[in-house]
Every structure is written in C-alpha cells, then in structure tokens.
Image (cartoon, helix red, strand yellow):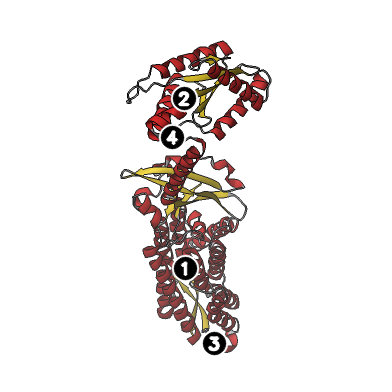
Amino acid sequence: MQPYIAILIISAFIFLACFKFLWSNLGVTGRKIIALSILLVAMWNGIYAAELLNHNLKTKILLFSIKYVIIVYIPVLWLIATSEFTEKGEFPKYSKIVFFIIPTIAAVIILSNPYSNLFAYDFNIELKNGFNILTKKLGDWFWVDTAYNYLINIINMAILLRATLSKGYFARKQAIGIIIGISFPIFSNIISTLSMQLANGIDFTPVSFLFSVLITGFAVIQYGFMNIVPIAREYVFEDMDELMIVMDINKKIIDINKKALNAFNTTSSNILGKPIKKISSEISNYDFSSLQNNPLKVQFKRNLYGREIYYYGSIKAIKSNSSEIIGYLLLLQDITQLTKVQNRLKKLNAKLYKESIMDGLTSLYNKKHITRLLSDEINAVAVTKKTLTIGIMDIDFFKKINDKYGHLVGDEVLKKVSKIIKSQAKGNIKIGRFGGEEFLIIMPGMALEAAAKLCNEIREKIEACEFEYKNLRVTTSIGLAEFKEDDINELIKIADDFLYKAKENGRNRIEF
C-alpha cells in the first residue's frame, strides 16, 4: 500500500473521531453543521483511498461519482456553519436552501454523468508514480460547480474577515483560526483542480483537511473555539445598556462588552482570560453553586476616581442542551443615580419620621410618641417583672412667666429646662413633652426611691439655673408613680395626682 493511501485511511478515521466528538456536544452554535461537514470529509478520504486502490474502471468511476456527490456540499455547509458561528444572521432560515440548489443539480448531473458527460467523460486508468489514477476530461458543469464552490469560499472568508474586525478579542482569534484552517484545503483544491486539468494527478485536498483539524484543535484549547463565546453572544449585544461579562466555568472573563470595558476603565487585551476578581472581588465572593436553578442577584459598589459607583444585576448560568453549566453571564446596571435618589429619600423619610415623633421646640419626644414608648415599657415589664417608675414634671407658674416676660422667653425656658433634663437622664431613660409645660420621664429598671433621687437632682439643677433675664427663676414640681400592674392610664393618673399634691404643698418639690 502506498503511504499516501495509508494517510487517507488514517485521516478518514481521525475525521470520524472528530465527527463523534462534535456530534456529542451539539449544545453549541454551529457544531451540528461542522460535524456533518467533517463526516463528509471523512467519507471523501475513505472513498478516495478506495478509488486509488481499485483497478476496475467501472468501480473507479462509481467511486469518483460518489466522492464528488459528497464534495459539492462541503463548501455550502461550511458557509452556513460560519454564519451561525459569527452570529451575524447573514441568511434567513429558509434562504439557506437556495445555497443547496447548485450542489444538488451538480449531484444529479454527476450521478447521471454516464448518460450526459456534463461533469466528466472519457475515463481511463493510468499508472502514475505508483498509483492507478483515474484520468478523465472535465465537462462544462464541473467548471460551473467549481466556480460556485470558490464563490461560496470567498463569501465564507469575507464573513470571517468581518468577524475579526467586529467581534471581541477571543472571538476574533477564533475567526482568524478558522480562516487559517480552511485556507489549507482551499489552496490545495486549487492546485489539485489545475493538476486534474493539466496532468490528472493526485488530489491532496482531502488530506489537507488534517491541517484544518490541527488549527481547529489549537483553537479549541487556546481560545475555546465553538465553546462558550458563541452561546453568550446570543445574549450579549454591544449596544445594550447593561454591562455584560461572560465567564467560563472557572470564573475567568472570556468576553466583555464595550460598556463594561468603559465602566471598569480597562481594555479587552488587559482583562480577557483574567479572573473576575481582577475587576470585582465582590462578584468572586458570591456563591455560584446556586446558579443551576436560579439566577443570582448581585449588588456592590466600587470607587472610581474618588466617586462611588453602585451596581445591581444578576449572574446567570450558561448551559448546554444537556443542562450542563459551561459558563456564566454577568449582567450589571449602573444604579448610582438611583441609589443617590434612594439615599436622599431615606434621609428625607428619616427626617420626616423624626419630625413626626419629636417636639419641634424642645427636641424631646412629643406626647404621642412618649405615650407609645410608655405603653411598650409597660408591656415589657409585664413580661420581665422588672421595676418601672414614671415622673410627670411641671414648670411652676409658667403662665406668669409668659405673661411677664413674653412667649419668646417662655419658649427659651422650655428649651433650657428640656436640656437640663436630658443632661441628667442617662441610659435607657426616655423623656417627652407631655403638655404645654409638662414633661413625662420614663425610668425603666428604677424603683421609686432611685427615681425620686434622680428627679430631685434634676429639680435642683433647674432651680439653680440662671437665665438671662433679671429676677427670672424657674422651679418645677414632680409627681412619681411606680408600676404595680396598672394600665397606662391608671399609671399616668397616679403620677398626675402626686404632681398636683406637690403643687398643693407649695411647689418646687417631689411627691410620691
């Protein structure tokens, strides 16, 4: 057996193995068509080896016919696969059938060639360089089909060249790899076609596809050819508003849109192939294990030139047809402006809430809120059985102060008294303005005696306070009540009764 025939047979088995591998991984764009193309190339190698080994003219002609029926479809299949791989949507679904018209006509002519001689004729067997070569003359339709195939190859190359200029960095290298790979059989076919015309020599085109396999194999290992990027490109568009990043199963970035490049102030050559933590450690810290069933919501912020940028989005699993996770798609939106608005709303809501519970003049709790706090304390004490004492304080002769010095001075007295109470009441003691010149002091955990001591210190501080007005002195009266399984109204009434007792007994004193 001649070495070249052995190479043809070995090549046929290599291509069959490639077909089996691709056919078992059909979850990716373009692989099905490429797998069929490689199966046809495998058949081409095997049939051509059988043709060279055979010595019978009729059998050789039959094998030649079958071989060319296979060959005429390969360029069209590669064109469709290229269109799907680059995801340009070059051809509408049903228009692809048009590309098969010329090859199908050629196939019919080849099979009927003994009656028409339109494809090849005048067949003979000649011994050349140790091979039984089937010599023939080429008919008109052979050249029609050859010209059509070269036109298809030119369109194929044009699509791939355009892809090298428009796709992302990794996809661009994939396209370059395909261009180099398919160049070998194209140029080999040109040489073989001229050889058939001039000398009816050996056709090296089928074996030249081995170089295509080697180049494609390199692309598989180095650039993930026909792997994750084509799937992601079904989702990722350069003109979309979202920041989009495609990661492989190891969380390495393999594609990124322009908006994301701009947002992270980087370039494709600097970031592709790098772990996602290079641009966001927050993303890498998320638990990707839950992505089999549901997308993962993400939110984080980063500093860029002294500005805080907020992002919100999701991580989605990219799956094959067999539901195997083969990568991840990160979608992010810049929500900085929205976050700023939300923060302003939070501050405004906090301000409004504070205003709703605070007394505007004294900055103490208002009556509604201090009453609610007292109700909460009573409910808590009913469970914990701890002590609770309240005090109601009233400024003595406050109406006279307003009448003599005016209401503005009266307001200053209220503010000064409130400040003294707050300065003396520490910890979990709560204070509120309970009426015009009345204050409610809630003292959780204090028994009556301790509460009386504290309130007396407050009373003495107020009495010793000097105001900016001549002869203005302020005193207070305080009534205390300790919780004894009373309801809130009963507890307040007890304290209020003791307040009136303090007033009746001369004011500026505490009663309990």
- Residue at the farthest left position: 305
Contact check, label 4 and label 2, Cβ < 8 Å: no
For the residues marked 2 and 3, what is the alpha-carbon distance in whole angstroms? 128 Å
Residue 283 visible in this rendered orientation of the protein = no
Provide residue 334's location: percent of width, then percent of height: 43, 51
Q: What element carries label 3?
A: loop
Label 4: which secondary element: loop
Q: Which of marks 1 and 3 is nearer the N terminus?
A: 1
Label 4 – label 3 distance at C-alpha: 110 Å
Q: Nearer the viewer, mark 4 or mark 2?
A: 2
Residue 113 image offset from top left, x and y in percent? 57, 84
Q: How far apart are marks 2 and 1 (CA)?
A: 89 Å
Location of residue 435 in the rendering, given as x and y in whole percent from the top left corner: 53, 31
Q: Residue at x 52, y 58 (%)?
A: 231
Query: Hey, what amino acid is under mark 2?
Result: Phe
Q: Can you give x and y, in whole percent of width and height, for residue 270 in the image?
A: 34, 49
